[in-house]
Image (spheres, rainbow, N blue to C red):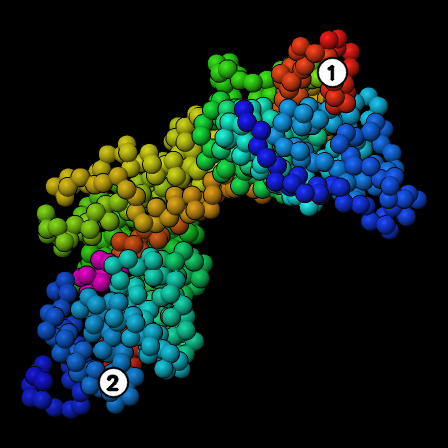
Amino acid sequence: MRPSFGPMLGTPFEYGVIALEEARLTWNKGAAPGILSRAARAFDDAAKTGDVGGEVGAAVARALAGDSESAIRRLREAIAKHPDEAGPYVALGVVLLRDADPLSHADEAAWALCAARDLAPQVAFIERELAVALCAAGHFMAALQSARAALALDPEDIDARLWSALLRLYFGGDASSSSVLVELAEEADNQLRGPMFWLGAAAGLYARCEFHEARIALRRSIAPMKMGYEPERPFVDAARRWMREVRGFGPGVAMAPDRWLKDVGGPQSEYVRTRAALTALRDACQRDPERALAEGVSALEVEAAISEMEARTRRGMLDWAARLLLRGFAEVFLPLRQYLEPPPYEAFAAMGVVLLDG
Amino acid sequence: MTQRPVPWLDGKAPWDEPAPEALCAEAGLVRGDVPVVRLLSAPSNIPELVALRAERFVPLFGEGPSRDEAVRAVANLALALGERADVRGGDHALSLSTHKALGSRPIEHLAAAVRAGDAPALYGEIAIGYVGILGASDTLRESVARHFLDARDGAQREARLATTVGGGDYASWREHYEALCAMPSDPSTRVARSWFDWVLARRFSGLDHLRAAIESEALDPASVWLAESALFVQGEDHSRDRLVALAESMMAPVARFVPRVISGCARDLVEGVRTPVSLRWKHLRAAASKDHAAAAIRHWLAAATAQLDDDEDHTAGTLGPEPTRAGRTAIEARTAAGEFLLDWFVGDRDAREDVDAYARRIVRVYHRLRGAQMVARALEELAPSQRGPETAAERVLWAGTKA
């Protein structure tokens, strides 16, 4: 086996870690397959000695090379063999969230990361990834709790701040978090992590009714993609599709009367016609209250039903909108992240592949 | 038309088996006193009741798909629902619809004959109408009608309506609606489907279609009545009067033969239309409880992808109309759960149950009215033209007719 850096030294596990490190450092919309293949082979040798870290490393190296199916299978086997080790659970969660279709794996990722959190509590990375998985799966309250737990462990964690702000904006209706999203993008730019965070900023700017700036933010988020390059088009289209839905449902959309009528489906919609029929019934009850009361109907009750229907529909639409926009954000953000960034060091640390000081 | 051999009449007929000794003793009879019932008595007597319990009766079309058996079926209706009929005459007539030893074989045999052209389709309609006019449960009505789903002409249409317009007994409206949607479209099934859409799923499109159908389509009177019962829910002026008038006009040709059907229908009808304002209120409450937000979001997604111009830089290419995966989930989850189920099974339980009770009554009356239509037609088509009534069954129906 050829060493990555310098002469051949150490155990197969160490060769694996070095190769993985090389892949991280040379990451440019992916890593060179040769480096990852070297890492995988080294970790395979380490795994033969019964090292759980070797099994995890071998699976992760394969996942980073694009072989998610094999990686997931290996990690499930590792979990079955070592159910009390947090590493395989963390790795499974990370690998599932780096899949091309993260929403379809979000529930399993959330399960794996929950299990990891039980085995290794107080790890900021696990809490943050759990928030992401829960959000992608549609469990927003639990996601918000995890994001807050991650922030409690590491207040500077910009990923946790991003998810917490998004959840507060769309799920909690907290308009102030739109500014956080915009500031985070600037901060992420300084850490060379801008593109994904500009996606969040687009949501924040739109919520602040800064529509032109929101468009610019969206362009910044897809700026690393080469124009007309087909393999990168899904990332661009997904972001634009998500933005189209933000423009329809998100905060910042002017809720004028005709807008509301349009949103519920126009004058022929069930909502509008039911409301009109209830209004007609209310008028009839007011015209002949004795007859209505004889049949147990009062104009007041009908009026209450009208306002309850309206309130429930508005609430329901907000709920649906939150569901669409948050899961939609995960659908765009996660593939973009897995394409532009390798897993961070703290991910490898949580998997038990490397040790971090501090 | 060729007479088909009846397999169970080759040897001893199942209804010729003697009644159990214990059953006879309980009623203070000896075996010889228990008759084989071909025609019901009016009013009933003890030996006949014992015969019915002991399965000593010839079931509906038990002696084959012949004119005599068709006349006997109609005569039994006249005896069970006539002026002098026993109060439980309807139940007794229903018990004649299937024989324990034969199961559904006589009806299967009849259906095969109708399919092969060995018996007129009218006989199939008589079998379906027989259980319909007696107010049979969904299960019994469907168990008879399903054999005629691939029959010819009117029998097939009646079978479709008998099997699909129902669901009140076990709250299986959804399954019936699905079956109705799967049926080939004709005016009667379209009306029934729109009735489900409006009355049970509270969809205004159903109401619009019913209004148009009443005005433009050539409908049979029972379908018109069904459509009118839906307009009644909307609180249309004079709808109650029209419902009653239509039911009376359909009953008129058979009123002399089966007067008790009128009282049965009247009971259900009066219960259903007694409190129009309350019914309308409950129907609208149930309509208001539907998930309008989900419908609105789906509508919005469709409209947004079709109409909104894309603000983005168009050098990236035109964006397809499909929503995000999260958006697709909003559309598909509802489809997977079943549109009709979600619109029918709303959270306002009291309102829903009251509307369901109305729907149950209307469906029962509807099948009785279809049965009445059938009896009227059968009386016309089976009447002895050249000669006067000869058999006992014919005398029940046409006693006053001269040769």
- Chain designation of label 1: B
Which contiguous range is marked in magenta? Answer: A334-341
Assess disc 1: are there few (<14), some (14-19) or many (≥20) residues with their C-alpha within 10 Å of its C-alpha: many
User: In front here: B267 or B100?
Assistant: B100
Q: CA distance from mark 1 to mark 2?
A: 97 Å
Query: Nearer the viewer's eye, disc 1 or disc 2?
Result: 1
Is A152 situated left or right of A195 in this image?
Answer: right
Q: Quadrant of residue B44?
A: top right
Position of the N terminus of chain A, as image quadrant, is bottom left
Dominant SS of magenta comes to helix
List the single residue furthest toward the top: B402
Amino acid carrying label 1: it is Pro
Q: Residue at x 36, y 41 (%)?
A: A249
Check disc 1 and report the residue beneath it.
B389
User: In front here: A120 or B226?
Assistant: B226
Say above or below: B353 vs B221. below
Amino acid carrying label 2: it is Ala
User: In front here: B313 or B239?
Assistant: B239
